[in-house]
Image (cartoon, coloured by chain):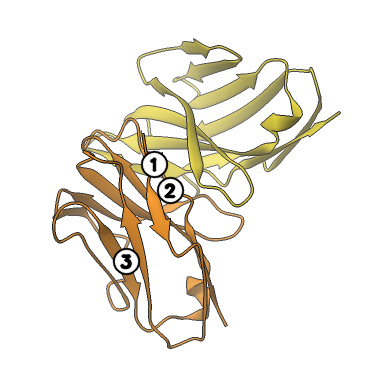
Amino acid sequence: EAGVAQSPRYKIIEKRQSVAFWCNPISGHATLYWYQQILGQGPKLLIQFQNNGVVDDSQLPKDRFSAERLKGVDSTLKIQPAKLEDSAVYLCASSLDLAGRLAFFGQGTRLTVV
Amino acid sequence: GEDVEQSLFLSVREGDSSVINCTYTDSSSTYLYWYKQEPGAGLQLLTYIFSNMDMKQDQRLTVLLNKKDKHLSLRIADTQTGDSAIYFCAESKRGSQGNLIFGKGTKLSVKP
C-alpha cells in the first residue's frame, strides 16, 4: 500500500516569498491533516480536512497560510508571504476517518526561510 | 504549560530495556499514542492505547497507562541500534480525536 506522498522534500526561500506544498494521502483516506514541526518540538496541527471540508483550522495563521483540498483527495498548503519563523518541517498525514486512530504521516517538506 | 511532557534524552546499551516516559494533562483524552521519527523521515505510528486500558503489549513494545497520574510509558525490550530515533508521545482529545497533541520527543540513543 502506498503511503502519504509529499513534495517537495526540501525548499529554501527568502522571507516575503511564497511557497506551496503538496500532499497526496493514502487512497481512501477521508481525513487529511497538515502539521508544522519546528526544530526540537513535536508536530502541531495546522488544519484538518474531512473530504474537502475543513474540520479544524483554529491553529492556522490565516493571514499568511492557506490550504485547500478541492476534490477531497490531494491537498496543497500555501504560505504567502513567508517569515523566518515559518522555517519548519511541514508534515501531511491521513487517516481513514475522523476518529484519527491510525494517522499515517508523510516524510514531510523541510522549509528554510532565509 | 505544555499539554504533553517528555524527557528529552535517553541512552541505553544494546540488549537492555528502554523506558520512555510521558505525562499529559487532559484527563478527557481518549487515545494516547507513541510515534517514532528517524532522521529525515516522517512519523511512524508505533502503537496506541485507549484510555480505558492499563496496558498494551505488542512484540517488544509494552505501553503502560496510569490514568490517575496521567502517566504513559513505552518500554522497548531488547533494544537494538535500529531503535535509535526520537519517540513522541501524543494524546487525542475527546471531540477532536484527529487533533493530536504531541510532546517534544525523547531522543533514544542505543550504544553497541
Mark 3 sits on what residue? A77
Tell me where residue A109 appears, x and y as whole percent: 47, 61
Callout 2: few (<14), some (14-19), or many (20+) C-alpha neighbours within 10 Å?
A: many
The lab-note entry on whether marks 2 and 3 share a chain reads: yes
Which mark is in front, 3 or 1?
1
Helix, strand or loop status at disc 1? loop
Q: Secondary structure at mark 2?
A: loop
Chain of the residue under label 1: A
* Horizontal arrangement in the rendering, residue B8 relative to residue A104 (left or right): right
Mark 1 — residue?
A: A3
Tag 3–tag 1 contact (CB < 8 Å): no
Q: Is B44 above or below relative to A45?
A: above
Circle 1: residue type:
Gly
Neighbor class of circle 3 (other Cα within 10 Å; few <14, some 14-19, many 20+) is some
The colour with which the image depicts chain A is orange
Q: Chain of mark 2?
A: A
Can you see residue A50? yes
Residue drawn at point x = 61 percent, y = 14 percent: B60
The residue under label 2 is A106
User: What residue do we see at 59% from left, 60% from top?
Assistant: A39
A55 versus A100 height, above or below: below
**Badge 1 vs badge 2, beta-carbon distance below 8 Å:** yes
Q: Position of residue A90 (x, y in %)?
A: 44, 60
Q: Amino acid at mark 3?
A: Leu
Please tell me which of labels 3 and 1 falls first in the chain. Answer: 1
Q: Residue B54: name its quadrant.
A: top left
Quadrant that contains the C terminus of chain B: top right
Please determine whether, in this image, residue A11 is positioned above or below residue A13. Answer: above
Q: Colour of chain B?
A: yellow
Chain letter for the residue marked with disc 3 in the picture: A
Q: Tell me which numbered mark, 2 or 3, is placed earlier along the sequence.
A: 3
